[in-house]
Image (spheres, helix red, strand yellow):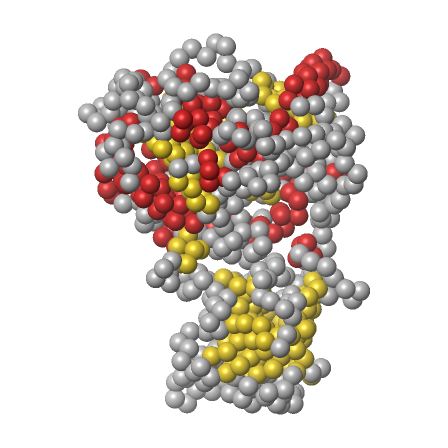
Amino acid sequence: MHLNPQISFLTLLLFSTLLCPGDTLAVETQTTEPPNIVFFFADDQTTSTLGCYGNPVIQTPNIDALAREGTRFDNACVSHSICWVSRTSILSGLSGRSFGTSSNPDTATPAAVAILYSDLLRESGYRTGYFGKWHAKMPRKYKREDHFDEFEAIGRNPFYKKQPNGSLRHETEVIVDRGIEFIQSQPKNKPFALNMWFNACHAEDSDRRPGIGHFPWPRAVDGMYDDIMIAAPRLNAPEIFDGLPDFLKTTINRERFFWRWNTDDKYQTNVRAYYRMVSGIDGAIGRFMQTLEAEGLADNTIIVYSADNGYYMGNRGLAGKWSHFEESLRVPLIIYDPRVQPSQRGQVTKATALNLDLPATFLDWADVEIPERYQGHSLQPIVNGEDRENWREETFHEHFAVRNRIPAFEGLRNENYKYVRYFDHENHEFLHDLKNDPDELINLAGDPDYEGVLAAMRQRTTEQVSEYGGPLDPITSLSRSTDPTPMASANNVGNVNDEGFMKVFDGKNLRQWSGDTKYWAVKDGAITGTTDGTLKMNRFLTWKGSTIRNFDLRVKVKVTHGGNSGIQYRGTSRPDLGLDVVTGYQCDVVANNAKYNGMLYEEKERRILAPTGNQVIIDPQGQSWIIDTWQVPTAAPDEWHEYRVLVEGNHHRHWIDGNKTVDVIDLDKVGRKLEGVLAVQVHVGPAMTIQYKDFEIKNLPDELPLQTAAAHPIPDGAIGVRPQGKLPKGWTPPIYGQQKK
């Protein structure tokens, strides 16, 4: 395991001194000077993805240091587990049902957001800054920048922002850059409140390429976790998913499970990428803390770290958030206040905290009166170690966003029990015993021994609903997002025609593709790749729609004389080589070369697997053996030709204009790939133009049987495929029967 390169020895030394209880820089008593407030806010982060919450793999030394010398909340939750409602709740101090209306609950009314906590801080003399993701649903013509002294919305899509010098910089880094500039320009003797709200660790939902496609990380953490096998989701037993009611099996939670977590390879690739995003945030926080110290501001600056909602990472057969289970509702919450007594540092509290508590806490620190309409409570007494005898005993939780595709619920959570009802689904109820069943695997709603608990919590939920704004207006329709177990997971992507084919290119633009626009464009209704003969590395254009597993692909291709391209499939994105570099299987597209046009090649791995006009078996050691040959007509350059690629399990077949070019069975369990991305290529060499149109794919069942060595014995007279590259003098191809002996 290597150390995050953003975590320098200086950074770690800083925390061992700045945050040490015995350090002379630490202030042991409350000062009269108003404290500065810095709020780091992550996106889509569950508590299980920080070292200080018990993750044994992830490297988050800077956040862990804040927890070690601050207060870590072990029972922090959101009132509503979705980005924009959670964020609006923090800005307004109100739950969604309260800041919206019964007909439109997730959009704030003008009155609810006329004055934000930032406005109240400004009125009391604070300089306020906001940099990062916004995504709060405000009324029409709302001017968010009017509520901060400095404001810059920095979103994803894309995560990598082009800089003035032409380089790319991750939004996490850009957000912290702006935060550093803010404190470096801070006037003396004036407090500040700075918000840095990250887009990480939110997935790039429109880009389902595993790894850097779906979870793009700052390039400073390239390679982290590559050498680690991360444990499978703890609650991934199929019977857990099977035990859910039907309406929870067909939601966005399940649809996105197949985008991210449904295979071991995809899980490992994506969870490593997600961990890199977290470590990227941690490294950026370390860089900010160094600047805070250098500017002489650290001793009186409170640091808060939290997230807008929890996150399923394959647990329960789900992805995303949006439901009532703990993975969705619980979030990290760490508060480091350098002013508290040494005895209070490093505490872990079981007190239930809500996202709604944060604006009240910010105002309390600033000695600003907390508005009566706020529904949260200041966390300052807990951080200070004061008696919490009168602290809340239960919290209200709900979900109503995207009600047609995400089941809506409302309910209560206390120290012992959680009750919810899914009110659009015949008030289906859950009752969980959080003490004896913390994984919430047993629904006690139908257990007669718990009738009293159920009735009491049902009644209190009704009372809370009334207090917060009343029942929501009914909706007219509900829809399924996915089949619980689709025939082909890639079928979650788009519409198919009567023959089962789906377009992967619309003939108009490259929105569903990723690649360098220096080489790729749309011309005459076709994907067009061009080079001028100076290319030093193959360049790729990758489809972002999904990974592909078993499929029937058809596309028309035209390549200029001397051109060299290929259709990459079941590929692997290789950011270590370049953002859009892809390895994996390839159906070669080569002008004026019948030996290679339509062959099976493997980019940067096993190389030539089957020359054109050959039936091949790849043995378990990765050696290709030719068992049959035939003639394939030459496909003329500068003309359209129809290519077909049919892949079923480990059986690969290619055609050009209806003529089979290769037939391959891959028995190499180590070298072969059973799933990956789809891409096209422009190759080093002479100047060329390559075009693709009428690009469509039919996804076949995921679980097609694999061909076996027993069913496909290699004949003794089979000839070994000639390896690529320079061969020793006098080399002759091996013969299978002779080699075997």
**Quarter of the view holding residue 478:** top right
671 up-or-down from 526: above or below: above
Identified at 57% across, 83% down, the residue is 559
Where residue 582 appears, as percent x and y from the top left, is 50, 66
In the image, 595 versus 682, the foreground residue is 682
- Left or right relative to 291: residue 644: right
510 up-or-down from 609: above or below: above
In the image, 510 versus 314, the foreground residue is 510
Where residue 24 appears, as percent x and y from the top left, is 19, 25
Where residue 502 appears, as percent x and y from the top left, is 70, 64
**Quarter of the view holding residue 23:** top left
Identified at 61% across, 52% down, the residue is 259
Is residue 548 visible in this depiction of the protein? yes
Is residue 324 visible in this depiction of the protein? no
Q: State the count of labels.
A: 0
**Quarter of the view holding residue 451:** top right
In the image, 270 versus 423, the foreground residue is 423
- Left or right relative to 28: residue 643: right
95 up-or-down from 12: above or below: above
Identified at 68% across, 54% down, the residue is 492
- Left or right relative to 21: residue 84: right
In the image, 511 versus 312, the foreground residue is 511
Identified at 77% across, 64% down, the residue is 497
Where residue 671 appears, as percent x and y from the top left, is 52, 65
